[in-house]
Amino acid sequence: MLRGYRGIWNAPLEKLGIRTIRDLLFFFPRDYECTGELVDLSELEAESEVTVVGEIADTRTGRTRYGKSIYSINVDCEDVQVKATWFNMRFLKDKFQAGDRVVLSGVAKPKANRWEMTHPRISIVDEDTEVQGSEVLPVYRLSQGISQPALRKLVKTAVDDYVEQLDEVLPELIRTQKGIGSIQEAIRGIHHPETLEDLEHHRLRFVYQELLVLQLALALRRWHHSISHKAPQLETDARIHSRITARFPFELTAAQQRVVQDICDDMARDEPMNRLLQGDVGSGKTVVAEYAMLLSVAHGHQAVLMAPTEILAQQHYHTLQEDLKNSRVNIGILTGSMKAAERREVLEGLASGDIDLLIGTHSVANDEVEFKSLALVVIDEQHKFGVRQRMAVRNNGLNPHYLVMSATPIPRTIAMGMFADLDISTIRQGPDHQQPVNTYLGDPEEREKWWEFYRGKLREGRQGYVIASTVERGTREDRLSVEEIYQGLADRILSDFRIGMVHGKMSPADKAETMARFHAHELDVLVATSVIEVGVNVPNASLMTIEDAQQFGLAQLHQLRGRVRRGHHTGYVCVFGNPANAEAETRLQSFVDTLDGFELAEIDFELRGPGDLFGTKQHGMPPLRVADLRRDRAIVELARDDAQALLESDPGLQGTQFVKLRKQVLRRYGRVLDVGDVG
Ligand code: ADP
Ligand code: MG
């Protein structure tokens, strides 16, 4: 523990999250500045970044023509004079006076008979101070009311006075193995590195520590759950298998069989399955979920499938009803728009066990729905929920198995970094009938040509989507609203066809009705925002125009494209957009060039980093402070391996050499990951 909490906290520091000296020590710079080399100006010829020392000859204040205040000083450096100038920095005025010895760092520009520096860093030094050039200075995040120099000084004092009291979290063994120095060295080095290489060395220590703590937390959660949560053991045999598969209108593909096998292995154990199934849109995840649900029912238990939207829930409900026609399996549906009486009936059915399978929207998770005996929770399109979601179900003491499904593949590094506690199954190859899609980058000059083609396909009997990026125009002049696009098409471009519109501002009933009409081919064209991104399945639709495509992320574009990949017709997608920067341009080009969702996920990761793709923030996972999953991916792997090795030799991390490490894991992740009472 750190002693000496006196009087450092005040409002500006509080705003930065600094309450204790420890916080101050761990308030890492957001960046660094290198001061130029210490030079003798008489030997310098061209403009460059330098550090100089001299004595102030005079100071002056004034105003520019436009009313900015100017403060300037002349400094004698040996036999050369430097004029330093600051604009709108009135507070400097009283700080310096003629005769002060100062250090200036910044860019020096030659002017007639002297040098000039604008906004150099400046500090007063006494005669005895030996001035250093080429320093690496920390740059901290600031808040209103505290300046960079003040914060630097504060941190420096804290480091000088208190760093010795810091506890070492990493056990000796690991430090020796990895060639990691003491925490004292590292803290000093991260705030006041001698060189940039030095800095990188210290940064890596904290990256490693942070990732190791995360990996330990994930592994501990897994271990903890495996010993404290009991799930029903649901074994599969040939009879059950053939009874289930007989219900499907098609043979399972090899990939589906493999995933089904993974799931059967999991569910046969008495610890809860915690599996992510990832596969492109249209790769056939639903039937795998159905298999797992029917396996639960075969053992006399219940299962629930949660979908992110009401449309999707309805769709799953119909698929299941179709497949389970004339069976004894009883299916219920629970959505937000149901009447109270219907709802009550469903809840009763779940509690009594009359309902075997429940399909619902995520509101199911928030209600404390009571099940007689729930064995399986399936969460569809999991990225819409956030991964860590758990249901608040009441369930007679058993813990259900979990299967989450996602059409947004998780890049390898993130899977390893953030989801090491999940088992992952992947469907890379969808059912054979999946059509290729031709994707084009629309040339604005040749819009008419695309629409000509689009109309031609509509006349052949196909249907099409037109995607808008926004419901309301608002202040954004550069994008068209769904309404504007709809009008333009209805009035002119597609005036011969039947057009409908869906967007998020419509009532669920209106949305559902329009979707149903599109489904029944009473509409040729559906103008929509990305509400149709997830799950809509109209096999006859093979055309898609995406407007203002720069507004969409790669994963989203790819999901949208999945809508025209579902039937027996070749799909055609044309994206129009004005990419504002190189990243957006690469994004659109990659989308056009690549049809593989996994490859796109990796490209997206390269382009944008991890972001918060998977809703971890929403569910309380603290953000990484030092590590960057993209930059530090090699260390992610290292930390995972090390965490596994540590826990293999000491499953609960109970050894005395791990006390501090374990404390840190619990402090940071105990609550979110529900590993609070490990051991
Ligand atoms: P997603 O992974 O996007 O949820 P779905 O489960 O909705 O994909 O499947 C997409 C389409 O492929 C559906 O129409 C489904 O009936 C069909 N399908 C799934 N598996 C097979 C299969 N093994 N053989 C033929 N068609 C299949
Ligand atoms: Mg699906």
Image: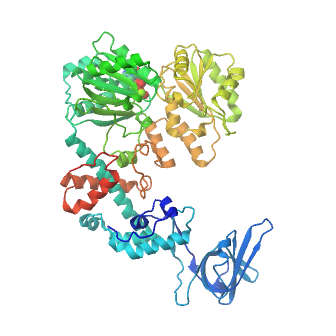
Q: Quadrant of residue 497?
A: top right
Most extreme residue toward the right is 65
**Residue 143 in view (yes/no):** yes
Left or right of 558 in this view: 51? right
Residue 176 location, x and y as percent? Answer: 27, 68
Left or right of 495 in this view: 572? left
Residue 491 location, x and y as percent? Answer: 72, 21
Residue 13 location, x and y as percent? Answer: 49, 63
Q: Is residue 177 above or below residue 522?
A: below
Q: Residue at x 31, y 58 (%)?
A: 664
Q: Is residue 121 above or below residue 480?
A: below
Q: Locate the N terminus and report the quarter of the image it occupies.
A: bottom left
Left or right of 254 in this view: 448? right
Residue 12 location, x and y as percent? Answer: 52, 63
**Residue 193 in view (yes/no):** no
Q: Which one is in front, 375 or 290? A: 375
Q: Quadrant of residue 518?
A: top right
Q: Is residue 115 above or below residue 602?
A: below
Ligand 1 location (quadrant): top left
Q: Number of marks in the image?
A: 0
Q: Residue at x 32, y 46 (%)?
A: 673
Q: Which one is in front, 530 or 6? A: 6
Left or right of 437 in this view: 493? right
